[in-house]
Image (cartoon, rainbow, N blue to C red):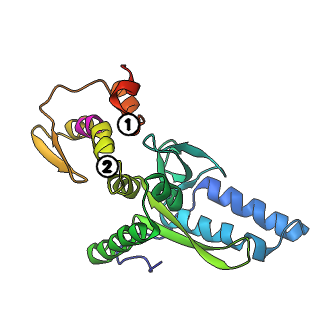
Amino acid sequence: MADDAPGHDAPTPSLKSQMLRTALHEAIRSGETTEAEQRPVFAFLDLTDRYKAIPADPDFKVSFLGLGHVQVMWGGDNAVHHEAFMAHHAWKAAGLTVEQWKEIRDNELRHAELSGRLPRVASFRASSKSGEEVDIWICNWEVALRLALAGPWRTEIKRNVSPALQLASRSAGITTRTRLYGIDLDVREPLPSTEVAEYQVHLGPLPDHLRGSR
């Protein structure tokens, strides 16, 4: 991944990142593991520091728009918001090909470079089961949503997420029409409660007769 764009603050390790590093160094000193074995973990922790994020617990997965489950890689300042996910979980659940994923990833990297911001995709190096060095890609929730909206269930996903996006737009002070992630939104429409909107986000591409009511 490219170096930080000009103007970005220095990486800030979270308390959890510091604790994990300390534990890993102690395990290496005691001979329980080696620095080479833990190199991917340190590379991942470097990423979380760069993005000022809190690393998630290993194998922590959440429902992804009703399409499947994705592994959470890190969260925000309060470790409640799941801000970044294992990218291959997201694009496979969305029904995309690897070529479609790479196109969206590369577009995001180009836009980030042009705008001088941190990319919403990032990677670290790890070893595969065969011993080959591979890039492990992570994407934030916005890119994950774009992946879903590029897949075969884009119509159902747009329908499911629109109320939540309308509520978010209204909370941000938008009072008329707007467009987010290629979805036309009319904030003036009657909107459901936050609970109902959040429930609808996770319905997935179910036929109407199986969706039930809430």
Magenta-highlighted stretch: main secondary structure?
helix
Mark yes or no: residue 76 visible.
no
Where disc 1 sits, the SS reads helix
Vertical arrangement, residue 82 with respect to residue 24, above or below: above
The residue at the point 17 percent across, 42 percent down is: 185
Left or right: residue 14 versus residue 91 is: right
Q: Amino acid at mark 1?
A: Val
Q: Quadrant of residue 155?
A: top left
Q: Which residue sits furthest left?
A: 176
Q: Is residue 163 magenta?
A: yes
Left or right: residue 162 versus residue 153 is: left
Which residues are the magenta region? 162-166
- Percent across and percent down for residue 12 are 52, 63
- Percent across and percent down for residue 110 are 32, 76
Vertical arrangement, residue 27 with respect to residue 200, above or below: below
The residue at the point 15 percent across, 36 percent down is: 187
Q: Amino acid at mark 2?
A: Arg
Work out which quarter of the rendered image holds the C terminus and state it: top left
- Percent across and percent down for residue 176 are 9, 39
| Residue hosting label 1 | 201
| Residue hosting label 2 | 154
Q: Is residue 131 magenta?
A: no
The residue at the point 53 percent across, 56 percent down is: 89
